[in-house]
Image: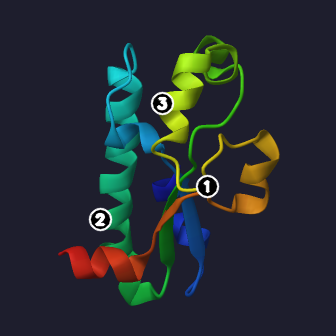
Amino acid sequence: MIAALLPILGYGGHTLNITSAVTRFYQQDHGLYSAMKDATEVISLYMATELGERRIAVNAIAPDAITSDFGGGQVHNNAEINQSLLEITPLERVGKPDDQGNGRPTSMTLSYQKQKKAR
């Protein structure tokens, strides 16, 4: 989709890709999802590098675990999973859907500057 929009994305534009914290730890039955989100982080790095000369900012945000129906609602229905997530979550609480509003990350932002340093 981004490739299709590039002709109308002006100089100095911005794109925001959504990834997941699940790329940083093992979660049973989430291999395919985690791989897809990891690919989102890699493509964000390449996009930031390739679109940087047009001053198009590329960011990827990875919200912490959010209580939702995703994955069968495990985050809010399973106390053991909830506790294990609390131990690795910078906010020291599981996120709520409103925490994701307006594109605000709850834990990590991969910015062009950070990606540039990683090269």
* 97 versus 48 height, above or below: above
Q: Which residue does the numbered mark 1 point to in the structure image?
A: 91
In the picture, residue 15 is in which quadrant? bottom right
Q: Residue at x 68, y 14 (%)?
A: 77
Task: Report the mark closest to the observer, 1 or 2.
Answer: 1
Mark 1 touches mark 2? (CB < 8 Å): no
Q: Classify 3 as above or below 93.
A: below
Q: Which residue is mark 2?
A: 46
Say few, some or many: other residues with alpha carbon within 10 Å of mark 1 (under 14 / 14 to 19 / 20 or more). few
Q: Is residue 2 above or below residue 12?
A: above
User: Residue at 36% across / 40% down in the picture?
Assistant: 23
Residue 67 image position (x, y, % from top left)? 70, 30
Which residue is nearer to you in this view: 10 or 65? Answer: 65
From the viewer's side, name the closer residue of 19 and 49.
19
Q: Which mark is residue 84?
A: 3
| Dot label at residue 106 | none
- Between marks 1 and 3, how big is the CA–CA gap? 13 Å
Question: How far apart are the alpha carbons under marks 2 and 3?
Answer: 33 Å
Q: Which amino acid lies under the numbered mark 2 shown in the image of this protein?
A: Tyr
Label 3: element kind: helix
Residue 85 in the image: x percent, y percent?
Answer: 51, 35
Left or right for 31, reference 99:
left
